[in-house]
Image: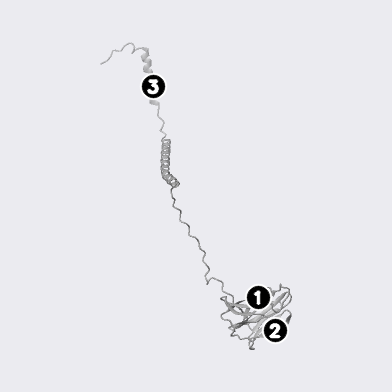
């Protein structure tokens, strides 16, 4: 049903309004929207998701730490007995076995006629007949002690003593014989204390040998009883032969 137009609809105001509408419509038709910033939107979305995940993980770690804190606090409560950690086993140094101990010394084996220098001018050598030696006071006049003239019984333990010296030193030596086992060491009791000497023997098992030592004089002189006792020990520490001087 058509409505009759009034004067207001056909007046100058109506024409202006119509013109404005047409102008706006044309302007709106010419406007083109700019493309959407999809890349920025995607980056923003990823940041938001990352923040949410970080927040969730932080909350989860906090929940895991709560039981651990409770356990620690319970362990420190008074009256609660803690289980002590097992003690480390004490280290025990193994005692040296007999096989690992150093073997006892044995006499130096010398060839017949081989000279052994005990000190300057004091030399000894052995032959099958016995002991030879020189002293600093008589370096060119060897002395001799026989083991075959019947004066010693090589089947019976015994030790002989020969001594020569001056106011500073005494040169000691002698023949030992007849002991059981293997001779190993010698100790000489003197007026100035105990002196340890050395042993020499010929190859094989002659049944005798020679000991020698040098003693430093401290008592002011040397008397006939300067040596009181000579003891030869075997490799097991037992007495091989012994002699007391009177």
Q: Few, some or many C-alpha atoms within 10 Å of disc 1 (few <14, some 14-19, many ≥20)?
A: some
The image shows residue 84, relative to residue 38, as above or below, that is below
Furthest residue toward bottom = 149
Q: Are marks 2 and 3 in contact (CB under 8 Å)?
A: no
Count of numbered circles in the view: 3
Q: Nearer the viewer, mark 2 or mark 3?
A: 2
Between tags 1 and 3, which lies in front?
A: 1
**Left or right: where 68 falls relative to 182:** left
Mark 2 crowd level (few <14, some 14–19, many ≥20, 10 Å Cα): few
Q: Nearer the viewer, residue 139 or 213?
A: 213
Which residue is the site of mark 1?
Answer: 189
Q: CA distance from mark 1 to mark 3?
A: 141 Å
Q: Is residue 63 positioned above or below 114 on the image?
A: above
The residue identified by callout 2 is: 143
C-alpha distance separating marks 2 and 3: 152 Å
Q: Residue furthest left?
A: 1
In which quadrant of the rendered view does residue 15 lie?
Answer: top left
Q: Secondary structure at mark 1?
A: strand
Mark sitting earlier along the chain (1/3): 3
User: On the image, numbered disc 3 is attached to which residue?
Assistant: 24
Q: Nearer the viewer, mark 1 or mark 2?
A: 1
* Image coordinates for residue 218, horizontal then vertical, percent: 71, 72
**Residue 66, how many percent across, how many down?**
42, 43
Task: Identify the mark nearer the N-term, 1 or 2.
Answer: 2
Identity of the residue drawn at 67% across and 83% down: 132
């Amino acid at each position: 049903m058509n409505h009759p137009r009034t004067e207001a609809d056909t007046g100058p105001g109506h024409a202006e309004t119509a013109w404005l509408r047409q102008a706006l419509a044309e302007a709106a038709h010419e406007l083109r929207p700019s493309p959407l910033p999809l890349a920025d939107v995607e980056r923003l979305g990823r940041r938001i998701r990352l923040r949410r995940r970080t927040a969730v993980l932080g909350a989860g770690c906090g929940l895991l730490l709560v039981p651990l804190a409770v356990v620690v606090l319970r362990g420190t409560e008074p009256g609660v007995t803690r289980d002590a950690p097992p003690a480390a086993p004490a280290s025990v140094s193994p005692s040296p076995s007999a096989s690992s101990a150093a073997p006892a010394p044995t006499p130096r084996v010398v060839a017949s006629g081989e000279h052994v220098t005990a000190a300057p001018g004091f030399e000894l050598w052995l032959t099958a007949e016995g002991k030879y030696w020189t002293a600093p006071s008589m370096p060119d006049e060897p002395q001799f002690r026989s083991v075959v003239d019947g004066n010693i019984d090589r089947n019976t333990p015994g030790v002989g003593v020969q001594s020569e010296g001056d106011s500073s030193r005494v040169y000691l030596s002698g023949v030992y014989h007849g002991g059981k086992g293997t001779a190993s060491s010698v100790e000489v009791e003197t007026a100035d204390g105990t002196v340890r000497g050395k042993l020499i023997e010929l190859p094989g098992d002659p049944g005798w040998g020679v000991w020698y030592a040098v003693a430093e004089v401290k008592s002011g002189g040397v008397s006939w009883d300067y040596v009181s006792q000579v003891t030869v020990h075997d490799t097991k520490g037992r007495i091989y032969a012994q002699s007391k001087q009177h």
